[in-house]
Image: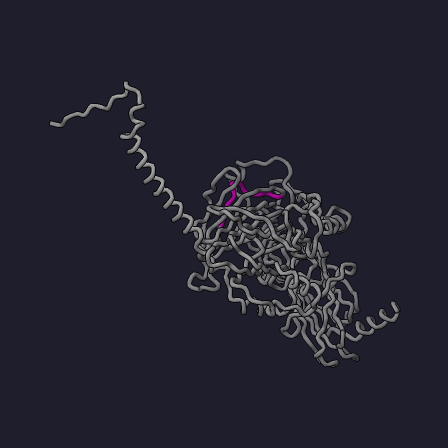
Amino acid sequence: MFVLISLVCQSILASIVNDDIKREFDVKGDALFIRYTIDFHLEDQKPDGAFYDFFLEYPVVKLSMVSFTLNGLPLQATFVEDENMYRIQLPKSIDGDETVTLHANVIYVHVLEPRPRQHTQDETAFVELLGSLVFPSPYPTTADSIIVHIHTDTILSHSEELQINQDKGRCKSSNGDVEPNTKIPFSIRYANPSPLLTISRYTRDVTISHGTDCHVEETYGVKNAGSKLIGEFNKFKTMVTPPSDSNIVRKYNLNIPKSSTNLYYRDEIGNISTSTVHAFNWESNQTGYLEMELEPRFHLWGGWKSTFYTGWNVGLSEFKRARELVTTSIQTKPSFFYSDEQSEVDSFQNDKSFKTAALPAREHTLVVPLAASMTYTPANVGILRLALPEGAKNVRCWANGFGSYNAVPIELVYDEEENNEEWDKKVEAVRIGSEPSYWEELAGDLTFYKEKDRGTRSLNGMPLDTEGSYKGRKTFSAMDYLGRRTFLFRRHNAINAPMFETIVIEYDLPTVFLAHKPLILIGLLLLFYIGYVILSKFAGWFKSGPLSQALPENIVEPRKVKKN
């Protein structure tokens, strides 16, 4: 039986031919964006149950996001861990001899290697990009081309097969008649125009309110993951002659909504005043945003770390969306789903054609970004702590976006310090070359907490209580007396980039909870007034009543001074 299945799979694989593969690499900071355009056709067989195997070019531990579309339509894919590839299910509507176009967008993090790995203050640090000139496809390829954008003209060395255009900071190469599973290594060593800034861990706290503004606060632990600074550090030298090394982190850039107010930026010592806010596309309601430039107390050289937090207030309209737009934007099954209704969770787990648009509507639909606001900066671990209004019920949430098809899953956890043992093993298993891997050093900066015994777990590590649903934690803010249901979402290799996943959350909120805080405040003021009136009456009774005779005789009334 196993031999028969293998022969069928080989037959399907052999029937696919790549007519043309175009890859475009775009390096931004410590992230690598790759866009694939693959034209292929099926030679002898109808695609009835056929699939396309898409191999990753780097280890999955470096993967942040991947998406697939065929002729403009999203596709479902399954990650095969042993092969480090995605198996894409092809539609049955494709004709056998028809040439179709597969588009893929992949984001990798921590791909660049610092060169040298250590340097002194007077030396300049560089980076090296390693890869393959041809796409490692299991199918024969007629034509294969690659373009690499490094955004700099300072190139130290590169592979001979690459054609360099230093004016545009671009490299390219072309190959024809490529055999299956072929790899041609290439390397580019250059001066990176931006430092390798990495977020070791961030926590994004979002408190939803219907009566007042919502509050957002982000706490960061950052590190310059570039070439480590060794030897003595001379601060005076940097003041006399400012260094031109691009490896130094001089500022952080955050993109926040244009309606944000009450911005602040602090660290462990206190408030930091070196911050600037710029407005972009201010007249546009859809694309307008604010860019915060945050300058740290000291510049981060290679290997240096820092922590800080920033926050702002924003209206509920920044998160609230029409349900029809959210549920129809992505037609594929979400990579993550949770509901208070166990029947909906069972349907998600068992139904391959699960669609959120078919679920009963809730009163409120919000879309909350999962990634931090720091642009194009990868985060080893990201936490979104989402606090709903008091009284929220019938909660349902899922990941909206192409996502990573569970290769790098979103986890709904009870405690943000729960350990992901599988991810820990993947990090430890990565080896690149003979020297210690750059990623292994980054992983050493993380604290992997021990697994805590919280009883039975369901999909994505969700703890189950006695009622069989995730209740989350409760947090309290000003004038909260019932507590807010708080959900914790965790994601590895999160990055603020287009098409990255967002959290869609739906819930019902009884009308009484929309005005319960003003009513409580009015009630407290009324009680205070009634108490004041009662005490005033008793004060007069004490002064003229029987108790006044029990007062000591030596207490005399103050003398009245006559005015002339």
Color encoding of the figure: one colour
Where residue 269 appears, as percent x and y from the top left, is 51, 37
Question: Quick one: which residue is furthest to the top in this view?
Answer: 554
Q: Is residue 378 left or right of residue 476?
A: right
Residue bounds of the magenta highlight:
293-302
Quadrant of image for the C terminus: top left
The number of discs equals 0
User: Please, is residue 31 above or below residue 356 in the view?
Assistant: above
Q: Main secondary structure of the magenta part?
A: loop
Residue 49 location, quadrant: bottom right
Image: 66 above or below 248: below
For the residue pair 134 and 443, the one nearer the viewer reads as 443
Where residue 244 appears, as percent x and y from the top left, is 55, 47
Q: Report if residue 421 lies within the magenta region.
A: no
> Residue 22 vs residue 42: left or right?
left
Q: Nearer the viewer, residue 479 or 213?
A: 479
Residue 116 in view, yes or no: no
Is 304 positioned to the left or the right of 290 in the image?
right
Q: Residue 506's x, y, as percent?
A: 55, 61
Q: Residue at x 83, y 71 (%)?
A: 10
Query: Quarter of the image containing the N terminus?
Result: bottom right
x and y, in percent, of residue 199 in the image:
60, 48
Which of the 4 image quarters holds residue 171?
bottom right
Furthest toward the front, the residue is: 546
Q: Foreground: 88 or 298?
A: 88
The answer to whether residue 259 is visible is yes
Q: Residue at x 49, y 55 (%)?
A: 256
